[in-house]
Image (cartoon, helix red, strand yellow):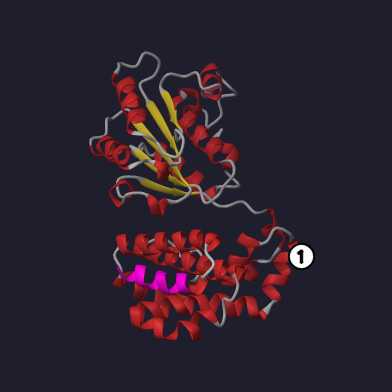
Amino acid sequence: MLDDFKETQFIAYKMITNSIKKNKISHAYLIETNGYSKKMDFALAFAKYLLCPTHQSNHGNCHDCTLCHRIDTNNFTELKIINPDGLWIKKEQLEQLQQEFSKKSIESEQKVYIINGAEKLNISAANSILKFLEEPEPNIVAILLTDNIYQLLETIISRCQIVSLKKQNSLEVKFDANIKKDMVFKIAIQEATTEEELINMISDESYRMNVEAAVNFANSYEIRKKDVLVDTNKLWHSIFKDKQQIMFGLDIMILYYKDILNKKMDRKLEIFDEYSEKIADLSKKNTISQICKKIQILLKTKENIKYNANINLLIDRMVIDLEE
Ligand SMILES: [Zn+2]
């Protein structure tokens, strides 16, 4: 049940339960999963909350009624779950869903569909889901799950209420609030797998310098655009030398652009509070599409690094792609 997530996913939990309590259920929710391992459990708990009458009247607890049990065993006709078929979610899968949902419901007023891996909607499937979202039917709620919101059409994003899940990390508990606010800590906690590793990262001065260097590169690029290529040796290659370091630098840039997007969408910055002024400035200079496009290019460059020998060239290529 949704209450199981009250502590671990407090913000998402509050957002959802408030909207239901105030009777302001949105017709579509886009859940940014951020690598959270229990994402599907969360989505199912949410679906139960919407579908099971006892759930809502009894503060999210129905003590396992038959309806909820059927949801657990994927046996409830008014809940449909769509998973990628191979690499993509295809148009036919959505057509089938629309067809089934157009029948009069026998069991429940409310219908819910979950799209797991919404970034894998192929173009025609994305367009058909868009039609669904543009003309919402009163009793249908869509729950879209995505690991990579930046691959979704902006038109889809803008029609959904966005709910962000927190990546779970048990290491975090042991540190005090002041340390947890530090940008380097917030980055290291996402990478470290043991406490020892985490402590090494946050106490290593060169780790902080590399974070700053990557942010500096993004800022220089935003000011000088293609001209930054003249200085890639100084600003990038002399700092991020091997594949692993380059991946790290790109990760930092991705997180930085995510915060620019957060600012643009009036959300709280996740990591780079230290750069809040600069981020405010850059959020004004970029459209949402431009920021998403840049994040995609950074992700693609990261992917290419794995297979490419000439990594220096790839970074130059990236700067050129960012410009286009
Ligand atoms: Zn129930």
In the picture, measured across the screen, residue 170 lies left or right of residue 53, that is right
The image shows residue 285, relative to residue 80, as above or below, that is below
x, y percentage for residue 295?
A: 41, 62
The residue under the point 48% across, 35% down is 46
Work out whether residue 18 or residue 140 is closer to the camera in this orientation and state it.
140
Quadrant in which the N terminus is drawn: top right
Quadrant of the image for the C terminus? bottom left
Label count reads 1
Task: Identify the residue at horizontal 48%, vertical 31% (top origin).
Answer: 49
Q: Is residue 322 magenta?
A: yes
| Of 285 and 124, the residue lying toward us | 124
Residue that badge 1 annotates: 196
In this view, which residue lies farthest toward the top? Answer: 106
SS at mark 1 in the image: helix
Farthest front residue in view:
309
What's the magenta bit mostly, secondary-structure-wise? helix
Q: Is residue 24 visible?
A: no
Judge whether 169 appears above or below 23 on screen: below
> Where is 299 relative to 100, above or below?
below
Neighbourhood count class around disc 1 (C-alpha, 10 Å): few under 14, some 14–19, many 20 upward: few
Question: Can I make out residue 252 in this image?
Answer: yes
User: Against 172, is 116 above or below?
Assistant: above
Q: In terms of image quadrants, where is residue 121?
A: top left
Bounds of the magenta segment: 313-324
Residue in the image at 45% along x and 39% along y: 87
Question: What residue type is disc 1 on?
Answer: Glu
Q: For this view, does 320 lie left or right of residue 242? A: left
- Where does residue 84 sit, x and y in percent of width and height? 45, 35
- Residue placed at 52% from the left, 70% from the top? 311
Asked whether, in this view, residue 178 is left or right of residue 267, the answer is right
Q: Residue furthest right?
A: 196
Q: Quadrant of residue 5?
A: top right
